[in-house]
């Protein structure tokens, strides 16, 4: 089962860390007003459908000094994967529909507690077979399973590989999307385009020093284009996405670091690094490519994504990828996944330099009065990744809408990983997960 | 051993499906696709695309497919005969499509009578019935598989 239904397992010809935001009600209100005034009443009355989905999941690490993906530690947690979503759909006629979805889950603006939020609220207009327009609150179609990432029953792995699925911190946006479809024969081509805005609180990495954890407010404008090609059991999908980030609070983005040489013999003198320059906006380009292929009981899925950040030195410039091989054996689907996430050389070199350079003793006194851990504190702010994971797991499908999953994952952190809350380097840890996903 | 067990289950399922089809045929219960009288005739491929949400209009006429509720015998036969797929995969397909925001699965009706009432009242509505069903006014057969 896959995230894109267009590569359907229905075999017919022509086939088939994020954070949260505060949204203003204006767009949703305008959307509802549009609906109220513009929909033809082809149905005798609008048709309402309530559906939903959920996951009850438990995950724990085998190590006491690591916390992964905000919540997963040795004590175990249900917060990493558990959630409940409710969706109300209204169909006005064959062309117009509206969808609202609320989700209760771990919060995206802080680490503690829970939250219930409106994640989707959009109007869909399908004037013809080959066009679909949507406006309102939507999810960006970044990766194959991005849009249905929270609907655990739609895929077999216990958790989508964080090495790639943390590529975009944007969960949803207020804006518009269009889909153009070509169905020329035994294949299908789709182009998805979107544009919108959102406000998020980006969780900065936490390792050793400073207040923890920290969320940085950002206003984001994003746009993207995704091309999909589906032929029989093969799906190919590539995308180009561009986001402009503007600091959402009073604090602008730090651009980089500058070095000051304090005269004197080491360890009294030496190089002192200080933050330098500010940027009001940051541009991030994301390139994605994915493929999914299945034959008989076998399925192979692979995706790669690159995040290109040029405006600041310690941004999340990185390359991530994974490959999953699975086989359906009756109701069981065992799988193996390998995933890798590696920052660009610039943030990794910066992290290494800051981490390994001692603060000159002269800087501990006047006029600087810096703590001896100053450089490491700066290093903690560098969003750097160097990790890979191997996952072995299986899902048991009770039905198309009910699935039990088990997974063992071993993750190795090299230089550092911003996904890990710990002073954790060149070591590995295990994560054990069990979850039950359903839809109704 | 487990593999053999799974194959056995598969064979049993296939036999059950085949038996259902044979039973329907013997009972004179072949399934036909019916629609509101305004709906143009369809070919089998177009019908599949309509039920997968890939086609929403035929010759400029908006179409609205409907289904009987999951578990219905007629629905199972429809999936086998016309969609050439089992119902579980069809449900899985729509679960994904619904939650990526690209469509809403066909509306479901608990009974054939409720379905027929909707078909009569809704231009472009498409459903399926046993071919012995009296369609009366407002409906027409748009596809019948030999």
Image (cartoon, rainbow, N blue to C red):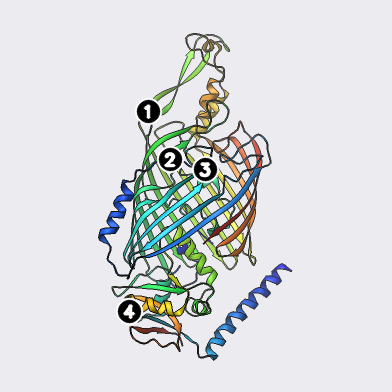
User: What SS does tag 1 mark?
Assistant: loop
C-alpha gap between disc 4 and disc 1: 60 Å
C-alpha gap between disc 3 and disc 4: 49 Å
Q: Chain of mark 4?
A: B
Q: Chain of mark 1?
A: A
User: What SS does tag 4 mark?
Assistant: loop
> Looking at the image, is A4 positioned above or below residue A19?
below
Q: Are marks 3 and 2 on the same chain?
A: yes
User: Which residue, given by chain and number where applicable, does mark 1 sit on?
Assistant: A250
Q: Residues within 10 Å of mark 1 (few under 14, many from 20)?
A: few
Q: Nearer the viewer, mark 3 or mark 4?
A: 3
Relative side of A57 to B32, left or right = right
Q: Residue furthest left?
A: A37
Q: Chain of mark 3?
A: A
Q: Nearer the viewer, residue A155 or A189?
A: A155
Mark 1 vs 3, N-terminal side: 3
Residue B36 in percent (x, y) is at 34, 79
Q: Nearer the viewer, mark 2 or mark 4?
A: 4
Q: Are marks 1 and 2 on the same chain?
A: yes
C-alpha gap between disc 3 and disc 2: 32 Å
Q: Residue furthest right?
A: B1
Q: Nearer the viewer, mark 3 or mark 2?
A: 3
Q: Chain of mark 2?
A: A
Dot 4 and dot 1 residues touching (CB under 8 Å): no
User: Which residue, given by chain and number where applicable, does mark 3 sit on?
Assistant: A114
Mark 3 vs 2, N-terminal side: 3
Q: Which residue appears at 58% of the width and 80% of the height?
A: B17
Which circle marks residue A308 in the picture? Answer: 2
């Amino acid at each position: 089962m896959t995230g894109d239904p267009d590569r359907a397992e229905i075999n017919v010809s022509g086939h088939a860390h994020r954070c949260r935001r505060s949204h203003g009600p204006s767009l949703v209100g305008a959307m509802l007003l549009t609906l109220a005034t513009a929909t033809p009443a082809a149905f005798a009355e609008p048709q309402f459908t309530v559906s939903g989905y959920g996951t009850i999941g438990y995950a724990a690490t085998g190590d006491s000094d690591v916390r992964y993906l905000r919540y997963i530690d040795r004590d175990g947690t249900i917060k990493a994967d558990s959630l409940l979503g409710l969706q109300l759909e209204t169909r006005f006629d064959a062309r117009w529909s509206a969808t609202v979805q609320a989700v209760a889950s771990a919060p995206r603006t802080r680490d503690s507690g829970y939250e219930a939020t409106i994640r989707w609220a959009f109007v869909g207009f399908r004037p013809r077979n080959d066009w679909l327009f949507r406006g309102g609150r939507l999810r960006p179609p970044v990766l194959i399973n991005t849009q249905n990432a929270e609907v655990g029953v739609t895929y077999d792995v216990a958790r989508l590989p964080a090495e790639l699925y943390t590529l975009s911190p944007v969960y949803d946006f207020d804006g518009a999307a269009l889909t153009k479809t070509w169905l020329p024969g035994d294949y299908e081509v789709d182009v998805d385009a979107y544009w919108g805005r959102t406000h998020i609180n980006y969780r900065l990495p936490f390792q050793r020093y400073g207040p923890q954890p920290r969320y940085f407010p950002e206003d984001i404008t994003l746009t993207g284009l995704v091309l999909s090609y589906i032929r029989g059991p093969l799906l190919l999908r590539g995308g180009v996405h561009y986001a402009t980030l503007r600091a959402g609070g009073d604090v602008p983005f730090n651009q980089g670091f500058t070095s000051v040489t304090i005269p004197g013999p080491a360890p009294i003198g030496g190089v002192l690094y200080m933050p330098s320059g500010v940027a009001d906006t940051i541009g991030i380009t994301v390139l994605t490519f994915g493929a999914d292929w299945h034959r008989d009981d076998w399925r192979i899925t692979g995706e790669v994504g690159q995040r290109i950040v040029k405006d600041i030195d310690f941004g999340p410039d990185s390359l991530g990828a994974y490959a999953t091989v699975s086989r359906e054996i009756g109701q069981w689907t065992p799988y193996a996944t390998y995933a890798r996430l590696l920052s660009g050389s610039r943030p990794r070199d910066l992290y290494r330099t800051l981490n390994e350079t001692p603060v000159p003793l002269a800087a501990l006194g006047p006029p600087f009065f810096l703590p001896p851990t100053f450089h490491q504190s700066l290093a903690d702010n560098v969003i750097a990744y160097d990790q890979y994971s191997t996952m072995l797991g299986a899902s048991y499908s009770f039905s198309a809408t009910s699935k039990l999953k088990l997974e063992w994952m071993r993750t190795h952190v090299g230089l550092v990983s911003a996904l890990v809350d710990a002073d954790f380097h060149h070591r590995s840890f295990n994560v054990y997960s069990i979850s039950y996903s359903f839809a109704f | 051993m487990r593999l053999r067990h799974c194959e056995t289950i598969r064979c049993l399922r296939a036999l059950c499906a085949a038996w259902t089809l044979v039973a329907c045929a013997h009972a004179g219960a072949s399934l036909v696709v019916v629609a509101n009288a305004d709906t143009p005739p369809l070919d089998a491929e177009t019908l599949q695309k309509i039920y997968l949400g890939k086609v929403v209009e035929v010759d400029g006429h908006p179409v609205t497919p409907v289904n009987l509720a999951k578990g219905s015998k007629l629905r199972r036969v429809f999936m086998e005969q016309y969609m050439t797929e089992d119902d579980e995969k069809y449900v899985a397909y729509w679960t994904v499509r619904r939650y990526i925001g690209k469509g809403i699965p066909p509306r479901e009706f608990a009974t054939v009578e409720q379905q027929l009432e909707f078909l009569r009242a809704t231009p472009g509505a498409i459903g399926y019935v046993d071919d012995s069903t009296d369609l009366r006014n407002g409906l027409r057969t748009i596809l019948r598989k030999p």
